Image: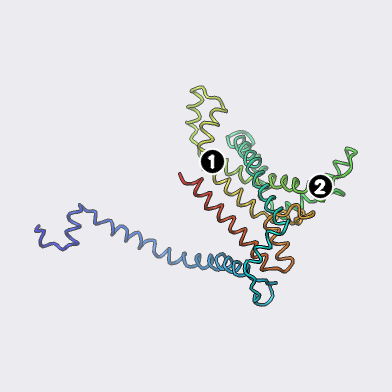
C-alpha cells in the first residue's frame, strides 16, 4: 500500500497498529450509557438543586438580614448575625457539647462497637440473634428513643426512680440537673448508635481472608497478635468510614435531644442544631438561625474535605 495515497487519518490508523480503534470503543460506551444519563441525570440534578443547593444559597442570603420569617427580608444587617452568635454563652456551650459528643463517640462508642463486632462476627451459635439485639436500638426512631429514655430517667415515675426507691435512696432527677443531664444524653447516644457501627465492623471483618488468620495462628501468633497485626490494619478503611459517620452525625444531633431535655436545663445540653432551633426558629429570628446554619454547614464542609484529604489520601 502506498503511504502517499492514504489520508492523514488512515495513515495514523495504519501506523498506530490498530490503536485507532479506541475512539470507536469509547464512542460505543458513550452511546450505550448516553440514554441512561439523559434519562436519570436531569431528574437527580433537578432534585439536588431544588432540595439542597437552593436552600443552602437561601440560608446564606437570609443570614445577612434581620428577618422574622414573615414577608420579604428587607432589613440588611451585614455580618451582625454572625457577630451575635459568638456572644451567646449557649452557643459556646453547644460547641463544647458537640465536641464532647464526638470525643465520647470516638473514644467509647467505636471501640465498644469494634469489640462486640469481633465477638459476633464469627460463625458462633446465636451470633445472628446477638447482632439483631445490638442493632435494634439503631432501628428505633430517635424521637421514640428519646421519649423512652426520658421516661426511664424520670425522677417521679421512671425506672431510675423505681431503682432508687428499692434501694432506699432519694430519686435522682438526672435530666433536671445541669451537671448530669449531658451525661445522660451521652449514655443514650452510645446505646443508640453503637449498633450501626458494629454492623459496619462486622461487614469489614467478614471481608478479611481467613487464610491470613489461619496462617498467623499456625506460625504461633496469639489471638491478640492476630487482631493487632492483621485484623486491625485490614479494618482501617472501615474504621475511617465509621469515624466520618460518627463525627458528622455528632455535629447534626437534634432529634434525640429535643424529647429528652430540649437543650436544657439552663442550656447545658444544647448542640449546634438545637441552638439553631431554639434561638432561631422558635424565637422567630430566621435570619439569626440562618447564620447559625451557615456556621454549622461550614464546619461540616471543612471537616469533610479535610478528613478526605488526610484520611483517604492513600485510598
Q: Nearer the viewer, residue 23 or 63?
A: 63
Left or right position of 225 against 22: right
| Residue at 55% across, 46% down | 241
In space, the residues marked 1 and 2 are separated at their CA atoms by 38 Å
Q: Could you say whether the residue bearing mark 1 is in a helix, strand or loop?
A: helix
Q: Which mark is residue 180?
A: none
Mark 1 or mark 2, which has the lower sequence index?
2
Choose top left, top right, bottom left or bottom right for residue 191: top right
Q: Nearer the viewer, residue 117 or 96?
A: 96
Q: In the figure, 281 relative to 137: above or below?
A: below
Q: Residues within 10 Å of mark 1 (few under 14, many from 20)?
A: some
Number of the front mark, 1 or 2 = 2
Q: Nearer the viewer, residue 77 or 63?
A: 77
Q: In the figure, 186 relative to 25: above or below?
A: above
| Residue at 88% across, 37% down | 167
Q: Could you say whether the residue bearing mark 2 is in a helix, strand or loop?
A: helix
| Residue at 54% across, 35% down | 232
Choose top left, top right, bottom left or bottom right for residue 87: bottom right
Query: Could you say where residue 100 lies in the image, as x and y percent from the top left?
Result: 68, 47
Q: How many marks?
A: 2
Q: In the figure, 306 relative to 80: above or below?
A: above
Residue under numbered circle 2: 174
Q: Which mark is residue 204?
A: 1
Left or right position of 271 against 171: left
- Say if mark 1 contacts mark 2, CB within 8 Å: no
What quarter of the picture does the N terminus occupy?
bottom left
| Residue at 85% across, 45% down | 172
Colour theme: rainbow
Query: Could you say where residue 283 lies in the image, as x and y percent from the top left?
Result: 74, 67
Left or right position of 243 against 284: left
Query: Could you say where residue 90 lies in the image, as x and y percent from the top left?
Result: 73, 56
Amino acid at each position: 500500500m502506498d503511504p502517499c495515497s492514504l489520508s492523514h487519518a488512515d495513515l495514523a490508523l495504519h501506523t498506530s497498529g490498530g490503536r485507532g480503534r479506541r475512539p470507536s470503543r469509547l464512542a460505543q460506551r458513550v452511546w450505550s450509557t448516553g440514554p441512561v444519563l439523559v434519562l436519570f441525570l436531569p431528574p437527580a440534578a433537578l432534585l439536588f438543586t431544588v432540595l439542597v443547593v437552593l436552600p443552602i444559597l437561601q440560608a446564606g442570603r437570609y443570614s445577612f438580614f434581620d428577618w422574622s420569617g414573615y414577608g420579604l427580608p428587607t432589613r440588611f444587617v451585614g455580618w451582625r448575625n454572625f457577630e451575635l452568635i459568638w456572644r451567646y454563652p449557649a452557643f459556646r456551650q453547644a460547641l463544647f457539647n458537640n465536641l464532647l459528643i464526638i470525643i465520647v463517640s470516638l473514644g467509647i462508642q467505636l471501640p465498644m462497637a469494634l469489640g462486640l463486632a469481633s465477638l459476633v462476627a464469627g460463625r458462633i451459635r446465636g451470633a445472628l440473634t446477638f447482632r439483631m439485639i445490638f442493632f435494634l436500638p439503631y432501628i428505633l426512631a430517635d424521637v421514640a428513643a428519646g421519649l423512652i429514655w426520658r421516661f426511664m430517667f424520670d425522677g417521679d415515675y421512671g425506672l431510675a426512680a423505681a431503682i432508687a426507691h428499692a434501694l432506699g435512696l432519694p430519686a435522682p432527677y438526672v435530666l433536671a440537673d445541669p451537671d448530669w443531664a449531658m451525661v445522660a444524653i451521652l449514655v443514650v447516644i452510645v446505646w443508640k448508635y453503637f449498633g450501626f457501627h458494629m454492623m459496619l465492623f462486622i461487614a469489614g471483618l467478614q471481608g478479611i481472608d481467613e487464610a491470613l488468620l489461619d496462617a498467623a495462628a499456625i506460625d504461633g501468633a496469639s489471638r491478640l497478635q492476630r487482631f493487632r497485626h492483621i485484623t486491625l490494619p485490614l479494618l482501617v478503611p472501615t474504621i475511617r468510614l465509621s469515624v466520618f459517620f460518627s463525627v458528622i452525625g455528632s455535629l447534626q444531633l437534634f432529634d434525640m435531644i429535643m424529647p429528652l431535655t430540649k437543650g436544657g436545663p439552663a442550656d447545658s445540653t444544647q448542640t449546634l442544631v438545637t441552638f439553631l432551633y431554639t434561638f432561631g426558629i422558635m424565637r422567630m429570628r430566621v435570619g439569626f438561625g440562618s447564620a447559625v446554619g451557615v456556621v454549622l454547614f461550614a464546619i461540616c464542609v471543612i471537616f469533610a474535605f479535610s478528613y478526605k484529604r488526610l484520611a483517604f489520601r492513600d485510598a
